[in-house]
Image: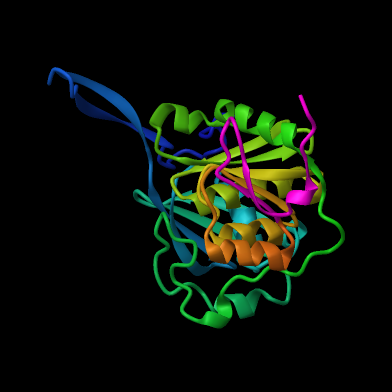
Amino acid sequence: MARPDDDMPPGVPPATATAGTVTIGFADGTARAGERRVAAEVPVQVLFGGVPFGIMMATPADLEDFAYGFSLTEGVVAAPGEIRAVAIEPAEGAVRLAVEVVGARLQAHLARKRAMTGRTSCGLCGVDDLAALPRAAGPAGDAPRVALRAIERALGALDEGQHLNAATRAVHGAAWATLDGEVLDVREDVGRHNALDKLIGACLRAGRNPGSGFVVVTSRASFEMVEKAATFGCRTLVAISAPTALAIDRARALDVTLAGIARRDSVTLFHGAERILADPR
């Protein structure tokens, strides 16, 4: 699995930086000077056809994956083949992500460009029209059945793929696992939505079948995380934290198996429990 900086062109800020620290113990008050790696957070301006669409605060790693996933989950493209090219350009402490797309829907989506910067924690910043809220299409076919042991296996393997988080303890991760729990892709970012968009982009570029696996995220399952997964076509979302009420509503409407509070010893099902195969040990 590639390191997160491997695909970045010269001039793009690194995904981590080094900061001086002082650590003080509660027990004895002893102070220890040191340093540690911290996650980078830079403005990433997304342009479609040369026209600015929005600015997201993101970690400058796996940005081509982000371009593909963001384009799909924002509804600018319906398939990866509609993206002709992606250019990653440094811009004085920021990054421009120039995406060239084809398709009749481009002009309509350029007309509703985001009105403000998207903050790290926000999946809807800059959407100023309720009609523009993301809505995935309804379910097609049956959702896959997933073994409980597969979820357990994926949770156990997730940490191994989180290189940035191992160094910084400050970023979210999103993983794609096969139905038997093998983790194939992990993407990370300071923003949980960005991490999922990067993962979706990686899956699109690799030609992954959305029905052949499931997504695991190291964050809460807010409604837009459910929408993004469903837009990709994934029907199973596992989250480390709990879902919101709206996320559960959308999971039911889209028939996405929704698991939350996923720990090494248990997982809580909020929709689709009948599709989780709990085989005895």
Q: Nearer the viewer, residue 63 or 168?
A: 168
What residue span does the magenta drawing correspond to?
A: 257-281
Q: Nearer the viewer, residue 229 or 275?
A: 275
Q: Residue at x 65, y 68 (%)?
A: 75
Above or below residue 270? Residue 40 is: above
Q: Is residue 121 left or right of residue 27?
A: right
Residue 247 horizontal/vertical position (percent) = 58, 62
Does residue 126 appear in the picture of this structure?
Answer: yes
Residue 181 lies in quadrant = top right
Above or below residue 134? Residue 208 is: above
Residue 238 horizontal/vertical position (percent) = 63, 45
Is 132 within the magenta? Answer: no
Classify the position of the C terminus by image quarter: top right
Residue 108 horizontal/vertical position (percent) = 62, 80
Q: How many marks?
A: 0
Residue sticking out furthest to the right: 141
Residue 152 lies in quadrant = top right
Q: Residue at x 51, y 61 (%)?
A: 46
